Amino acid sequence: MPSKQLDQEGIFLKKLRRLKNVRAGHLSTVSARRNEINELLSSEENVHLVTEKLLGFLAAVEMFKEAHLAYSLNLEDEVSVARCQEQFNPLSPKGFCIFEAIFWIHALHGLS
């Protein structure tokens, strides 16, 4: 006869796996939108397109942040928490794309 504790662990692991998959999906969307913006930064003619894509990127980041929080609050071991936080760090090399795009737009519009 299965124990109640094993049933609870199974339920928790299933929930954690679902949260991780949702988070991974949102992270994939963020990466795809970031890559779209990076490709457009090669030409000044794309400034309006980059501006539009930036709004979609920021919306995707917000969705990722919500999924990240839901997932990370359920992690129990320090290694998983650290790995999860690394992916969330906006100052990572991948995170700098957004700053580059904003500075690029400002430079082309003569803003400061």
Image: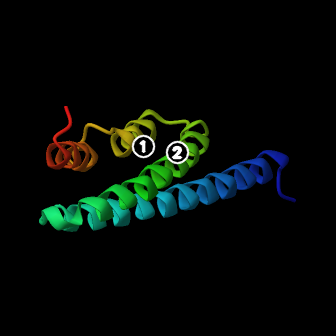
Q: Name the residue carrying label 2.
A: 68
Q: Residue at horizontal 27%, vertical 62%?
A: 37
Pointers 2 and 1 in contact (C-beta within 8 Å): yes
Q: Upstream in the sequence, badge 2 or badge 1?
A: 2
Q: Residue at horizontal 61%, vertical 54%?
A: 19
- Decide: is 63 above or below 38: above
What amino acid is found at the position of numbered circle 2 in the picture? His
Disc 2 versus disc 1: distance between alpha carbons? 8 Å
Residue 80 percent across, percent down from the top left: 44, 42
* Lateral position of residue 9 relative to residue 41, left or right: right
* Lateral position of residue 37 relative to residue 77, left or right: left
Q: Name the residue carrying label 1.
A: 84
Residue sitting farthest toward the front: 110
Residue 24 percent across, percent down from the top left: 48, 59
The picture quadrant where one finds residue 45 is: bottom left
Tell me the element at label 2. helix
